[in-house]
Image: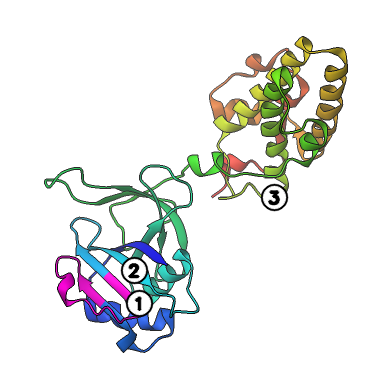
Amino acid sequence: MMYNLLLAGIFNPVGLREALAKVFDLPVVRIDVVDEEELEYRNWDAWVSVEYSVQSGDVSCSLAVYATEDVKEKPSEEGISLGLSGFLDAVILFPAEEKYPSLWRVATPRGEVAYARLREPEDDAEVFRITDVEIPVPELPGASISRFPEVIKVLQLPTPIVDSYIPGEAEGGLWEIRGLAVNWERLTVRMATGWPPVAWYPASMYEEDLRFRDKVQKLAQDISDDDRGLVLEMLDEVDGVYRGMTVEDGGLALAEACGLSLGDFVGRPWYWLRRPYELPWRAE
């Protein structure tokens, strides 16, 4: 197994070797740490090998960690990052599951894990910069505290109601309606589960969800009577879930968050005039 990690802190090969021994619960003699420019000195019999490359800027070192089959208990990337961060008293970055450019995860010595934006150098004149992080990290004083909406969009949430009415292999108008309806049901799932994965949801995305709901209603007028009845029955069920988790406010909360006037909500469907009990775009 291979781990690609970045170290933001003081780099010490000896300290790294000892920390890895603790993380993998192995004798130090089973750990090898070598500069990637000096692979002729690598111990090929080691169970855990690290090839490091000294960097500059906010990242002091990049680490390619290899664990052989001799290592029976292999931690996850998050696990090894948290372990190293605690033992080294430094921030460790590891790749985020969401494959967005520049998006990484950071592990802190306090056991925290958060998203971070990393700007990698494009030429020799540039250095690594951690520009944004999701939570305050004292070890990264130059990073701004920011949210990352893209991690929300890629999260796959279950949509049992839509699935029970429109199969994934639907075609034509039903296929387009299914895609929009899945998004609508996912909004209710987000509410019910605390707005995963970051307990936050921007008002702009909430507004977009309501527009998708509008489009479902419009597209339903252009399909067969039988299919239309199916879609409207499905909508009625999802709408009932949405209604049960929201409260009437005339559109005030969304208008304030999106810079709209209440006049903009005149004539809009009922779901535009409701809001979640706890506003997700105000979550800390």
Q: The disc labelled 2 sits on which kind of residue?
A: Val
Which mark sits nearer the N-terminus, 1 or 2? 1
What residue did someone put label 3 on?
Answer: 193
Which mark sits nearer the N-terminus, 3 or 2? 2
Which element type, helix, strand or loop, lies under badge 2?
strand
Of residues 38 and 18, the one drawn nearer to the viewer in this rendering: 38
Examine the rendering and report whether any part of residue 250 can be seen: no
What residue did someone put label 2 on?
Answer: 65
Which mark sits nearer the N-terminus, 1 or 3? 1
Q: The disc labelled 1 sits on which kind of residue?
A: Val
Measured as percent of width and height from the top left, residue 200 is found at 57, 45
Which element type, helix, strand or loop, lies under badge 1?
strand
Mark 1 and mark 2: span between their CA atoms?
7 Å
Which element type, helix, strand or loop, lies under badge 3?
loop
Q: Taking 89 as reference, is 155 left or right?
A: right
Q: Residue at x 55, y 37 (%)?
A: 202
The answer to whether mark 1 and mark 2 are in CB contact below 8 A is yes
Q: Taking 125 as reference, is 168 left or right?
A: right
What residue did someone put label 1 on?
Answer: 48
Measured as percent of width and height from the top left, residue 7 is found at 29, 64
Magenta-highlighted residues: 33-50
- Number of numbered markers: 3
Measured as percent of width and height from the top left, residue 17 is found at 29, 80
Quarter holding residue 231 = top right
